[in-house]
Structure formats: C-alpha cells, structure tokens
Image (cartoon, grey):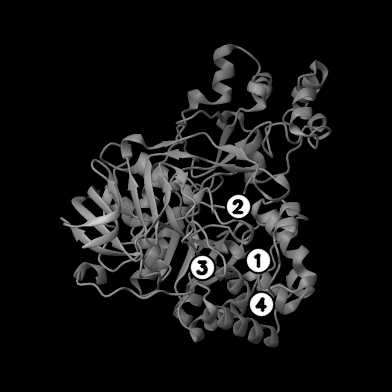
Amino acid sequence: MQFDILIRNGTVVDGLGGDPYQADIGILDGCIAEIGKIEGSADEEIDAAGKLVTPGFVDIHTHYDAQATWSDRLTPSSSHGVTTAVMGNCGVGFAPCRPEDHDNLIRLMEGVEDIPGVVMTEGIPWKWESFPEFLDFLGQRNYDIDIGAYIPHAPLRVYTMGQRGLNREPATAADLAQMSSIVSEAIEAGALGFSTSRSLNHRSSEQNLMPGISASESELMAIANGIKRAGIGLLQFIAEFSEPETDFAMLRRVTEKSGVPMTFSLSQRPNTPELWRTILRLTEQANKEGTNIQPQVYCRPIGLLLGQKLQYNFFFFSPSYVAIKELPAHERLTAMHNPETRRKIIAEFPADVPDSVINRSLVDLENIYLMTDSFDYAPKDQDSLAAIAAQRGVPLAELAYDLLIENNGENVFYAPALNYAEKNLDAVEEMLKHPDTLFGLGDGGAHVGIICDASGQTFMLQHWVGDGGRGSISIGQIIKSLTLDNARAMNLMDRGVLAKNYRADINVIDRDRLKLYRPEIQYDLPLGGGRLTQRANGYTATIVAGEVTYRNGEPTGHLPGKLVRGAQPMPRVNIVTLTS
C-alpha cells in the first residue's frame, strides 16, 4: 500500500491509557490508515526507533482569540505538540460585537488576559458582528493547528444589554431570551460551548469587574438551555468559590437541570491552600450522583515571569521605578545603572503594593527564583533570591536589583503564584491523578508579558512520567490526559487516539532530548509588540491532519489546521475499548 507518511518502529502510546507497544503507523489522506507491522511505501518515512509516537495534544484552555485573527501560527502551543486548541475561555472574546463596543471588549481582554490593547486595536480586523460571522472569518483561515471556540459571556452580555451589561445590571426576561437564542445560534454555527468568569481577579484594563461576574442563576440557566436546545456543548467557568458549598451548589444545579456538562478552573491558592480538596470532594459527590463536572488543573505552579525587559519586576510599585518604567527597555536599563536611581529604588522597596495574589507575589523575594535553561519548576528554598542574599551576606533588595540589571537586563525570574502554597507539587500531583479532573489552564495566547505556561504538555512528559521523571504517573495515563480525555470532554470524538480512521494528529517525541528552554520575548505582535514564548527540544515531528507542521522544533510552513465547528463524530472503528 502507498501512504502519504509512514512512521516506522515507534513506541506507540495510543491515548487509551495502556502500556506502550511497538508499531508502525501509516497515514493517508489526513487519517490513520494502518497500525501494526506495515509493508508498504510512502512519500515520506519517519524513523521513530527509540521514540514515542502519541496522538497530538488537545489543549482545552487557551486565549488565541486575537492571535488567530492575524497569525497563522498559534505558538507557543503549536511548538509543544498541541494539534487542537480551544479558545474563548474565561468569558472574554470578540464576538458577538457591535462596532461601537470594539474598544470595550479590547479593554476586557487587555485587563483579564494581559494582551496589550494597542496590539489588539491594530491587529484585529473586526470583519464580523455575530458569533457565526466570527466563525466564518476564522473558517476561511489556515493554521498550524486546529482551533475551536467557546462563545464568551462578556461579549454576549454586552451585545444583548449594551451598557447595562457592562454595568453588571440584572438581565430582564427579554435579555435572557435573547442571550439564550444567541447561544443556540452560536452552537448551531459551531461553538464548542459557553464560557464565563466569576473571578474578582478578572477586571478590564480600567479595573472594572467582568460583565458576567454576578450573573444570576436564571441567566446561567437560560444560557445552558440555549446550548441544550441547539445540540451539544460545554459550560466553562472560573469561579472564586469564596463560599464553596453555596457556590458549587449553584453551578451544580445549572448543569444538572440543563444536562450540559461543565468544566472549571481549579488550583491551590496560597491564602486558602486546602480549598481545592473541598471542591474536588464536592465534584466527586456530584458526579457519583449523575452530573458531569470536570475541573481543569495545571501540572506545575502557575508562575509569574519577572524581568527588566518584561512587564513586571519586584520594584514595579517603587515610586522611583514608576518614574522610569515607561521608557524603552534600553533607556530604562541605562537609568537603572545610575547610582542615585539605584539607591532610591532599593530604599523604597517594597513600596505600597495593592493587595492581590499577583501583586503580593511580585515582592515576595523568599519565593522568587532566577531562571536558567532547564529550570526546575519545583524550586527549592535554598535557590530563592532571599537565600542567595543570605549566602552572599548582602541586603536582599540590593541583590535583587543587581540581578535585575545584570546580563544586559536579560535575566528572567520566576514567582510561583498558585499551586505552590507548601513549596512542593504534592497538591498538583493529587489533582492530576484525580479521576474527575482534566489537564488544562496553560492559557496559550494570553498573559503575554507575565506568564508563559503553554509549555505544560512538555513539562508533563519531563516531570510526571513515572519511568524516569519525578512523578508516579504512567506514560499511558499522561498521554491519555493530554489527548483522549480532553478531546472527549470537548466532544471532539475524531481525535485523541491512535487508531485506524482517526485523524492523523500525531507527535513523534524523543524523550531523551526533551528540554524546556528559558522563556524569552519574541517581538512578533502587531506594531512590533513583544510576547513571552518558550522553546523546547525533543519534538522530532508534529503532524496535523496528515501533514508535518513541525520538524525538530522548527515549523515546516505547512498550515493544515482549520476551525473545528462543534462536536465531531467518532470514526467507525473495531476497537471495543474506544467506546468504553
């Protein structure tokens, strides 16, 4: 048989959760045509001896809503083995939207997801108003991965209610009917579901709370029923859970009464380090009683990246630094080398810091670490800036200042903000292993100046695999969590598995060479804006719909990725375990 691509001699981890096995994979017309010992030839053969062959990774929590309108490469995610990404999370996005509300939605995205407003103003073409028109625009474009989208709550509410929606006023019966109808229309056009945020940390660039933060249960029910009426979809939430039992009960009622599955963000918070256990207990109880709720968890600390050339650093709130922070990076660095400026900024540390998890993390030098290539994302106390200052016998703020301007201002520092309350990853491991959780929260496309967590898939393979990593999770289960579990949660039944007739979304991975480089700034946004990216070694090939998109970490120029419209049916296969 003649194939387009033949992957020979690989160690196949098929996404079903079982042990690896040796097999060849033949690809034809964008799908897997054969698996086993294959006799045949191909236009291209990939020797995968000694390497893992896995399904392409499915990333269910990204924010490429803006990037997807101006770029055909959805990095960093696509360079870490991701072949399908879901955007529109957390209730922010750009459709539906009337022309007069463009700036409102940009300010929301700028504040919540840390994407510069001027970049979006320049880059977003706004060739749509309704959500179906937004999908039509995306559907005309090609990418290095497939993308799917939620309809987000903020634009939905503003489109329906105008200024009343932005002001967080209660929705009228007419508002509820219109929102429900728009959501149904979006699902029919191909939305994967609906997303919203009830987080106090999510604010516009003008510090206004999200339009949907206090939406009533009746509003959420109307939206959920809009999904149910139109077909298949998902509810995606981020919530405070400040009153865990009460807040969870409301979300549970919405998903129970509507029958629409739900997913939400879950992490260990420093001020309530045991709250995640309560939420998992409530989730487990609800699911045993027939609901479908799956928290999304991340695989390491959700950390802030600080530096002289980045958006934030430990002196961000010092008045003498505020006076120079808007200068171009090279001019700011020159000013910081001035002895008098140095003296003033150090004397002002830590200044008056507005109270929030992020702001507190900026000045907690006991929990800030200098990054290197192959950085340990479970850093030890003895590696913190405070410990280094004590070892050297120098004042802590002076050491931090000097490291900040050292190396031409290129140094990058890591401040774990979530998932590291006890200075270890024990809570993360327990969350990852829980049968009700999904892997997510990488936030690809967002937080371009302070967070770079879209490399989580690579970290999972480095850190958590039990046969050589630090963790105790089998390679089969790791790959299943990155592929099949997420694909099924999103109702994308045609991917996430290496089996005959499934999509040929595939990674060939050399685990011995897997390496994460230190995050770096890449100036490729509109207007030359910078964003954090992170490179990796070890991906021999990434294949999307039967075309090699990355080879040894470098893009090939092929762009087979497309918009995924709605639920995708399972291919006809003869493997019983695929339907179990």
The residue pinned by badge 4 equals: 130
Task: Say which amino acid is labelled 1.
Answer: Ile
Dot 3: what SS? loop
Which of the two residues, 128 or 422, is positioned nearer the viewer here?
128
Report how far apart the C-alphas of labels 4 and 2 lie in the structure: 23 Å
Choose the circle earlier in sequence order: 2 or 3.
2
Q: Earlier in the sequence, mark 4 or mark 2?
A: 4
Q: Which residue is mark 1?
A: 213
Q: Which mark is residue 563?
A: 3
Element under disc 1: loop
| Sequence-first tag of 4 and 3 | 4
- Residue type (three-letter) at the residue carrying disc 2: Ala
Tell me which residue sits at (18%, 51%) in the image: 21
Q: In this figure, which residue is indicated by the disc labeled 2?
A: 446
Q: For the residues marked 2 and 3, what is the alpha-carbon distance in whole angstroms?
A: 19 Å
Classed neighbour count for the residue bearing mark 1: other residues with Cα under 10 Å, few (<14), some (14–19), many (≥20): many
- In the rendered image, which quarter is residue 286 located in? bottom left
**What is the x, y in percent for residue 62?**
54, 57
The correct choice, above or below, for 517 with respect to 266 in the image is: above
Asked whether disc 4 touches disc 2, contact meaning CB atoms under 8 Å apart, the reply is no
Place of residue 121 in the rendered image (x, y in percent of width and height, measured from the top left): 75, 58
Label 2 vs label 1, nearer the camera: 2
Label 2 and label 1: CA atoms lie apart by: 20 Å
Of circles 2 and 3, the one toward us is 3
Q: Is disc 4 placed on a helix, strand or loop?
A: loop
The residue type indicated by label 4 comes to: Ser
Mark 4 or 2: in front is 4
Contact, mark 2 vs mark 3 (Cβ under 8 Å): no
At x 75%, y 69%, the residue is 166
